[in-house]
Image (spheres, rainbow, N blue to C red):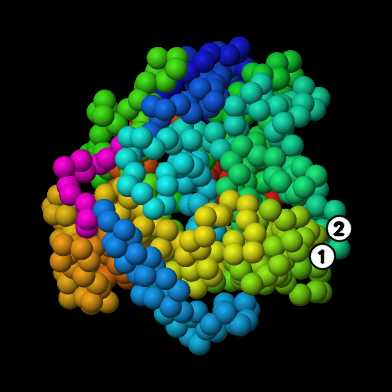
Amino acid sequence: MTRKPTLLPLLALTLAAQVAQAQTLDATGTTAAATDSTTTLLSVSIDPNVAALRQSTNTFTRMFRNLPPFAPQTDSVRTAMKQLGAVGGVLDAKDVLTDPIKSITDPANFSPNNADNPNMTAGVTFFGQFLDHDITLDKNSPLNRVSSPSRTINFRTAAFDLDSVYGNGPAGSPELYQTINGRIKFKVERIPGAEAVSRNGAPRYDLPRAADGTAIMAEGRNDENAIVSQFHVAMLRFHNAVTDYLAAQPGNANAKPAALFAAARRYVTWHYQWIIVNEFLPLTIGQDRVTNILTNGTRFFNAQDPANQYVTADGNRNILLPIEFSVAAYRFGHSQVRPSYRLNFGPTGGSPFFAFIFDDNLDPTDPDPADLRGGKRAPRRFVDWQTFFNFGDTNFRPNKRIDSHLSSPLMVLPGSKAASPGLPADGLQSLASRNLVRHVNFGLPSGQDIAYRMGVTALTPAELPELASYVVDGGVRLDQSTPLWYYILKEAEVKESGLRMGDVGGNIVGEVFVGLLKADSASYISVRPGWKPTLPSATPGTFKITDLLKFAGAVPPL
């Protein structure tokens, strides 16, 4: 529904899975019998003119329009929110930040308030961040004033279309691309000197960068930290690998570059969407909720409602994201970030690289700081994904539980000495405080009111004892009228032991994700609901994040 697909020239594909299915995908997404061993596929462009979508009508909407704000929209309430999210406050996990290795190996003493989640690996956090950057970007809403969702521009398309990676495509964003032997690929750059500090001397790669180190990419926030930056690199390499894979099919020898690019982009996007529906969402909200939403539809976010749509410059209708999702529910991942990580295993026979995610005490001009902030290129600043996802060995590590504690480095984001790529530069360094202040600005409802509206059991004051002393303007008690983001974290902690989201958070996230995919006329759910992944994978017919990384060539053996 979000865009009318543009039809490109026929591209012959001889993928074994498609031949076995003897199917051809036509312009409408229906199937027809193949006539021989070469399957023809009509490519559907999902390369929107992003610049045209960045307009004043691409704003945000409300999921619960008739519910009142959780508290008055006053400066004193903003002050209370800053205090609630401050260093040493209720939300601070109070981690001991003296040793990034012991932070991982001895959590009982170094992170006693910051429990691990045995059901999710550390990389899920950053895949979730990557998804967020694909669908939402608010660059302009002020931090200390009342804001309106309908007047706040979303500078991303509210669709899982990877505009954060592809930008405006080869014509509109030529700085991202290069054409080699008739194949349009993303630019990536080898990290000089990385072989000397990499297992088995494997080469490592980075985003293309300008002379001053600024990343050349469609979504600058994906250079905020080294891990999400390296995942963005993996997505670039995934596209390049898919391009080579399709070009190698016997029937594609004479494929035009634009047709090959469009087919590769669709393969990349559909496999990415498959991961969202079949891996990320079940881990995050539970398979039961995913199945229910897919089967029975959405109850609280109706993408077909004109109030949740805007008209693009070319007359199509696109979806508006609910502010309850972008400002509250989808910020649950902040509680999953670990204080520190093993970024890589180092050279053969050498030591791994451990570091805190952020450390504001470090010199921002250091070309290779001891934390994992983004915007830097140095030999050791690459990721060994075996720590972050389960490749069938014992190297992976968990992320943190979804609960009402944030790792302490997030309470003091880098920025006091100089701006850091992808991070705020307005003086408020606590990520928790920033989230809560925006609740006041946008007048978000309380978690309790949304629970009542959904018909699910709301948290009681007895389940929010740490908020009992917080009474704000109008006599509003926060243990009875809780800011939605805090409520969602606490709901997961109390109702789901922090292993996944609870009813309020899970329904908001699940309905928005499924709603966006069903409303996107180019998604696999819309075009071909019964589609299964066709790229090589550990289990044929499915596709996981680990399969994507391996196919991209981003997982050198240890």
Q: Is residue 498 visible?
A: no
Query: Residue most toward the front?
Result: 75
| Residue occupying image coordinates x 28% and y 61% | 77
Residue 198 in the image: state x and y as whole percent: 79, 62
Q: Is residue 503 above or below residue 467?
A: above
Question: Which element is circle 2 on?
Answer: loop
Residue 259 is inside the magenta segment:
no
Residue 62 is inside the magenta segment:
yes
Instruction: Answer whether labels 2 and 1 touch (C-beta < 8 Å).
Output: yes
Q: Badge 1 local density, few (<14 within 10 Å), some, or many (20+)?
A: many
Q: Is residue 95 left or right of residue 325?
A: right
The kind of residue tagged 1 is Val
> What stretch of residues is rendered in magenta?
61-72
Q: Quadrant of the C terminus?
A: bottom right
Q: Badge 2 local density, few (<14 within 10 Å), some, or many (20+)?
A: some
The kind of residue tagged 2 is Gly
> Mark 2 to mark 1: distance in Å?
7 Å
Query: Closer to the camera, 404 or 115?
Result: 404
Residue 439 in the image: state x and y as whole percent: 32, 54
The quarter of the displayed image where residue 503 is located:
bottom left
Question: Which element is circle 1 on?
Answer: helix
The quarter of the displayed image where residue 308 is located:
top left
| Residue occupying image coordinates x 47% and y 65% | 430
| Residue occupying image coordinates x 42% and y 35% | 153
Q: Is residue 236 above or below residue 363?
A: above
Task: Give me the disc on residue 197.
Answer: 1
State the residue position of label 2.
193
Q: Is residue 237 above or below residue 110?
A: above
The quarter of the displayed image where residue 363 is located:
bottom right
